[in-house]
Image (tube, rainbow, N blue to C red):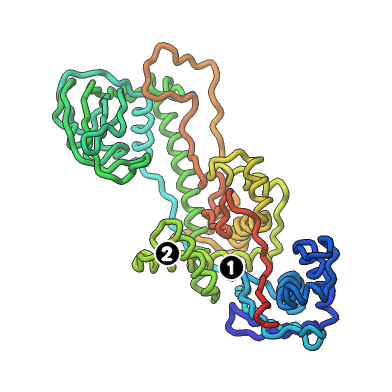
Amino acid sequence: MKSAVETLNPTRVKLTVEVPYEELKPSLDKAYKTISSQVTVPGFRKGKVPPRIIDQRIGHGAVLEEAVNDALPHFYAQAIEEGELRPLGQPTVDVTEVPDASGTGELKFTAEVDVRPEITLPDLESLEVSVDDVEVTDADVDERVESLRERFGTLTTVERPVAEADFVSVDIRAEIDGNEIDSVKGVSYQLGTGTMLPGIDEALTGLSAGESNTFEAPLAGGDRAGESATVTVTLQAVKNRELPALDDDFAQLASEFDTLDELRANLREQADLQKRYEQGMQARERVLEKLLADVEVPVPDGLVAEEVRRHLEGENRLEDDEHRAEVEVEARSAFKTQLLLDALAEREQVQVSQQELIEYLVSSSQQYGMEPNEFAKAVDEAGQVPAMVQEVARRKALPVVLAKASVKDASGNVVDLEALVPNTVDEHEGHDHSGHDHEGHSHGLPVPTGPAVADPTALPSFDFGGFTPDDEAEDDQPAATAAEKA
């Protein structure tokens, strides 16, 4: 077999492949056996029909089609390997010549495919970014104190009309065209939080217990989500939150500290820790932004087009040109980031351990609402394990960059990102909180939570090839019809 590579642009190549008849012969023999086992010819048992009879009855073109479709994946993969190419997505294959029935001629085909571009990366140790200073103010501490007071507040029923920020207990019924769609009773809600249907705050304001009001609002879920419904809200009770006094007794109630001053000092430390995590996230974002701005990363147009089509098709918005433009920008940006991080992971020889892959699979399974073992099986059957490994490598690449880059705050101080290790607050023992009717209760002080704590340099998850648990494994190799070439 002979193959040649023509570079069409930085992200796309054209392969020209020529296969001698002798190398195609095994696939032709296999094709005759396959067809012989499938057709019924009088006088012959299935699987025993001679090749010349198949040519007469079925046609040599059908045999060539079967043989070429069987052989193409192998010869395409061989050409990819010989050309040291790293394809992205499916190729477009064109069979230009096939041997005739006498064995004269060759199998010739071309294949155009998007490939991973060559990316020139900078010296990471010369990379410099600046982040904001970390400053904890009294207002930051006051905010945390108030949040803690609210957790230990007590709700008391009051006999007055609903006012701003009140807590209420309500019954809600939604109707469309006079038919009840949904209803709930005894729902607790605080005005101003925006966690209920739009318009409910206005409908409740001024009501007294036992009174009702109606308003129009789009349904938030269910089979008729998004449809406008007539909503009736009935007020059951108005509750006012009474906050505990800020004194040493409150410090002992809400924490392991004996005095309010000790509590405030601890809350200041936590605010400082949280801001340093936020500083680490900012460093991550700015390092990535600088790399994306400084490094030329060609993105295959075909890859972007396919992602845009898949996205719009899933939303049933293929004709929405304005949304298409938005999705195209987002897809191109995401692919550019992926390709950059892939290049960094490769150059820095980032390795992914089995434990890291398992942790990522467990985390991803939660996004799909699946059991980890079930999700891992679906990923394996869909052939997406390499994509998962690659995604973990991407996530590990940026911390490698941050470790080598120079990160300073606005005052010129070097930021030690390695010091951003999440701390936990031990639960205090022997502290009796019985007898208190708190709205919230905690045996430890609130500590920073979420991705910033777990890993201030963690990247948001990108789409890995459009995988969904229901996908079946797809053959990454090309197929072509050659009957018309016979």
Residue at numbered disc 1: 339
Percent of width and height locating residue 377? 67, 45
Where disc 2 sits, the SS reads helix
Tell me which residue sits at (26%, 29%) in the image.
172
Percent of width and height locating residue 111? 65, 79
Which residue sits furthest bottom?
104
Report the front residue among 395 and 406.
395
Is 165 rendered above or below residue 391? above
Amino acid type indicated by mark 2: Val
> What is the number of the mark on residue 153?
none
Q: Quadrant of the N terminus?
A: bottom right
Tell me which residue sits at (28%, 39%) in the image.
197
265 left or right of 35 in image? left
Tell me which residue sits at (38%, 38%) in the image.
141
Residue at numbered disc 2: 327
Where disc 1 sits, the SS reads helix
Label 2: few (<14), some (14–19) or many (≥20) C-alpha neighbours in 10 Å: some
285 left or right of 343 in image? left
Amino acid type indicated by mark 1: Leu
Mark closer to the chain start, 1 or 2: 2
| Viewer-side label of 1, 2 | 2
